Image (tube, grey):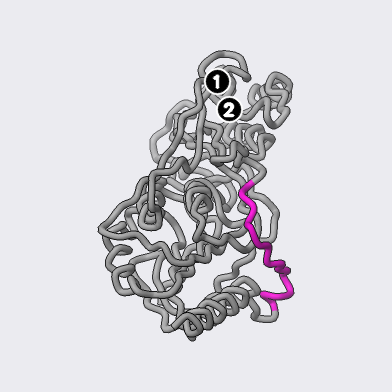
Amino acid sequence: MHILSSSRSRALAFVGALLVCSCSSETTAPPSQNDFVSQFDAVWSKYDSTYPYFDYKHVNWDSLRTVYRARAVAATSEQELANVVRDMLGQLRDVHSWLIAPNGSSVSTYSPATLVNWRSDVWQSYVRGYGWQQQQTNWGYGRVEGVPYFVFGSWNPAQFNAAAVDAALEQFKSAPALIIDVRMNGGGNSALADSIAARFFDSTRVATYVRYRNGPMHTDFGALQAARVSPRGAWQFRKPVLLLIGRGCFSSNEEFIAAMSQLPNVTVVGDTTGGGSGNPAMFDLGGGWQYSVPRWIEYTAAMQIVEWKGIAPSIVVPTKAADFDAGIDPVLEYAARWATTVQGQRVTQN
């Protein structure tokens, strides 16, 4: 059985120290100090004209330029400059701000220190009893007390597609309910996430709104743009759905959660999501390094900003580290009780 990716999957929680690039056998002149300073200025200016959260986060970007430019002036290598940029962007506390080293490794500038209500080893001990069917990487399904249980560890179209999920759903068309677990899902491709959500939509609904910077001032923004989800497939699952979420949910997974939260047959349980949305674009720093720049503010359909706030569940399931240390997953325990109740109601109705 493949292990699902951690809650900090994809670009949202890159770990590891910056790596020193291997030296070439050829002798080349290192960049001058002026090159490092101009590279720093280019990063600062790109954020100054693009980044959407300065005002929301009460960040004095000019002050940070003064502090970190002095370090850029003193930099003697591309590695040192990358360290300076990393530290400056870290002040934004934005999981969508990161660097990519010349060797392709990702370097985080910020990783939230919060308890995630999911742990891989504990989760695996539970799904062994669920008749688990591992599918392509990062998703699969089983049954919790007879109720189908779907898990999506990321929204990565290189790992699976909507057609594969459709085929699995077809097996459970007559199921009395469904459980979806995305607590470990750090994001990915929003089109894939929306295509799965669309199998549960009975009509077109607004899932989220976004807006981009459109001027030099940090408060200059364009109009709100609505992201809508419409029904997809020959049929939609309209029976009760339990959606499990938590602090490990970010980015396009929060879009999925925001969309599913609009549906009256969906109950969202667990913990508030991580609160990170930015639709970043990549730019060249120099010396083989790249850096990301978040470009939008995303809102729920109720106009709540996702960044830093996250999306709260309708039912909170308290968890603590000691639970997982003891091999207990309180959220799955809740799901089992819910599934038992649903099955009992089905028997009563019949």
- Which quadrant of the structure image shows residue 174? bottom left
Q: Amino acid at mark 2?
A: Pro
Q: Does residue 11 show up?
A: no
Residue drawn at 55 percent across, 55 percent down: 8
Residue 39 location in percent, x, y? Answer: 53, 23
In this figure, which residue is indicated by the disc labeled 1? 221
Q: Residue at x 42, y 79 (%)?
A: 132
Q: Are marks 2 and 1 in contact (CB under 8 Å)?
A: yes
Report whether 89 appears left or right of 263. Answer: right
Earlier-in-chain disc, 2 versus 1: 2
The crowding category of the residue bearing disc 1, from other C-alpha atoms within 10 Å (few below 14, some 14 to 19, many at least 20), is: some
Q: Secondary structure at mark 2?
A: loop
Q: Is residue 178 above or below residue 30?
A: below
Q: Which residue is mark 2?
A: 52
Residue at position x 34%, y 50% in the image? 231
User: Considering the image in quadrants, where does the N terminus appear?
Assistant: bottom left
Q: Mark 2 and mark 1: span between their CA atoms?
A: 8 Å
Region of the chain picked out in magenta, as a range = 310-325
